[in-house]
Image (spheres, rainbow, N blue to C red):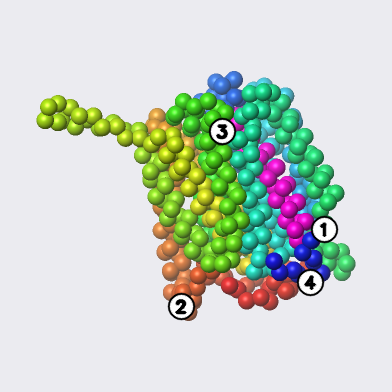
């Protein structure tokens, strides 16, 4: 990877490695309700709608918090914000074990959800160590920390069986607190903060950081992320419940199968970043949406029986996906969603190099809100229809609408504003007019701003 002025390759690897590890731990904590929630559901006798709300509540906090955590990271640096966010979250996870009622569980889940805000802290911190042409790959590697969901799905069921869900939550709290301390000790202050301190410049104002949010383009990126990330989080939480209910599997087996979905949905994000750098984010987004449509169509088909009036009497046909085939489909879906997540975040440091925290925070927030609303929608659909595959029908509709909308928007913008870019492959949207540079900037941003857009 290219090395920025004043930044060594060792500095880059240190920042990327520490951020990815911390994000992995945070993501594992963020999705812990996908496992312990099943036990809580049994203990409290919750409906599917109540269970969906419980699982989704941490996602709400993790989504909304990304806005202000992104701004604060731009102002004070990731070396300060990352450990602080992890320590506060670890306290909330520990306190979760003293809760007795459903209503207080929801309140405790809000605090646990701060773990999800770690994503934008890591994006803002990591992006400062790499030049524009390599940020897609670097952020893809960092985003592989989504594998924390697989860690929870694989490991937490066995911890719950051996220790109980309360002790499992305490183990998670301790690991998160230790990670916070290690990050603060070993991480270095990013180049932007070093430059500002050396020059005596103050932090960039929150108003300046939030300026890009008035651009429609930013919100367009956020809608793409609603599916590729929001649905990923929703399914990581929902699939253990689905396997237990639809196929009658034990919780440990269901957790392992759900982990097989979460694993490629996480580790291949680095590949998605590399593909976006190599062939363009537009290509990756089309690939993600088209493959997802095919897979979700198959997953949506319910267990069905047909009776045909034959010559000698009724003939019955049964159709349904075996658990093995269904698991294989989830692996494919998780893989292409991981590519799409990286493609979305390829755009942000290119178009908004001075506003990565705020723009990335908004995109992450909208995507995270998908992880909040979708599990609730899953529960409502299950209670209303009684069909196990109804949630996948809803996701199929969302992807279909998103694919058409993205294609129409891209072509309309190309024809109306930049006909010469009709064959441009690298970005899913034509750039908006460049924003004025914030009052407080740094040498690193200047070099990024002068590079031509891909």
Left or right: where 336 falls relative to 15: left
- The reply to whether residue 209 is visible in this rendering is no
Q: Circle 1 sits on which residue?
A: 189
Disc number placed over residue 419 in the picture, else none:
2
Crowd class of label 4 (few under 14; some 14 to 19; many from 20; radius 10 Å) = few
SS type, badge 2: helix
Q: Are marks 4 and 2 in contact (CB under 8 Å)?
A: no
Magenta segment boundaries in residue numbering = 11-37
Mark whose residue sits in front, 1 or 3: 3
Q: Is residue 307 magenta?
A: no
SS type, badge 4: loop
Determine the image quadrant of residue 54.
top right
Left or right: where 286 falls relative to 134: left
Crowd class of label 2 (few under 14; some 14 to 19; many from 20; radius 10 Å) = few
Q: Is residue 13 magenta?
A: yes
| Mark 2 or mark 3: whose residue is earlier in sequence | 3
């Amino acid at each position: 990877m290219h090395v920025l002025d004043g930044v060594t390759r060792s500095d880059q690897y240190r920042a990327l490695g520490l951020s990815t590890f911390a994000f992995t731990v945070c993501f594992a904590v963020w999705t812990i309700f996908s496992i312990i929630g099943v036990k809580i559901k049994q203990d409290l006798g919750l409906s599917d709608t109540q269970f969906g709300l419980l699982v989704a509540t941490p996602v709400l906090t993790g989504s909304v918090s990304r806005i202000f955590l992104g701004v604060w990271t731009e102002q004070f640096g990731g070396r300060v914000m990352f450990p602080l966010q992890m320590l506060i979250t670890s306290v909330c996870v520990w306190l979760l074990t003293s809760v007795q009622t459903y209503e207080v569980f929801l309140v405790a889940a809000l605090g646990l959800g701060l773990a999800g805000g770690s994503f934008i802290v890591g994006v803002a911190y990591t992006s400062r160590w790499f030049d524009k042409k390599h940020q897609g790959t670097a952020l893809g590697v960092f985003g592989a920390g989504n594998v924390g969901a697989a860690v929870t799905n694989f490991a937490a069921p066995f911890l719950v069986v051996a220790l109980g869900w309360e002790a499992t939550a305490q183990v998670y709290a301790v690991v998160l607190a230790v990670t916070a301390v290690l990050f603060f000790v070993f991480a270095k202050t990013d180049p932007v903060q070093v430059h500002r301190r050396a020059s005596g410049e103050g932090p960039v104002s929150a108003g300046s950081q939030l300026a890009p949010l008035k651009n429609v383009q930013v919100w367009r990126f956020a809608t793409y992320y609603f599916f590729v990330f929001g649905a990923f989080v929703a399914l990581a939480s929902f699939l253990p419940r689905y396997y237990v209910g639809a196929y009658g599997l034990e919780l440990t087996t269901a957790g392992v199968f759900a982990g097989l979905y979460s694993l490629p949905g996480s580790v291949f994000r680095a590949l998605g970043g590399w593909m976006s750098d190599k062939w363009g984010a537009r290509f990756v987004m089309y690939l993600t949406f088209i493959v997802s449509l095919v897979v979700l169509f198959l997953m949506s088909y319910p267990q069905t029986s047909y009776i045909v009036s034959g010559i000698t009497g009724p003939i019955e046909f049964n159709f349904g996906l075996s658990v093995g085939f269904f698991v294989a489909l989830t692996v494919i879906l998780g893989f292409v969603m991981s590519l799409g997540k990286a493609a979305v975040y390829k755009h942000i440091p290119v178009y908004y190099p001075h506003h990565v925290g705020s723009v990335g925070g908004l995109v992450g927030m909208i995507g995270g809100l998908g992880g909040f609303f979708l599990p609730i929608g899953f529960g409502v659909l299950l209670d209303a229809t009684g069909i196990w595959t109804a949630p996948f029908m809803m996701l199929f509709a969302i992807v279909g609408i998103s694919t058409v909308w993205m294609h129409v928007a891209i072509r309309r913008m190309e024809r109306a504003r930049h006909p010469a870019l009709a064959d441009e492959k690298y970005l899913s949207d034509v750039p908006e007019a460049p924003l004025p540079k914030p009052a407080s900037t740094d040498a690193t941003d200047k070099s990024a701003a002068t590079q031509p857009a891909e």
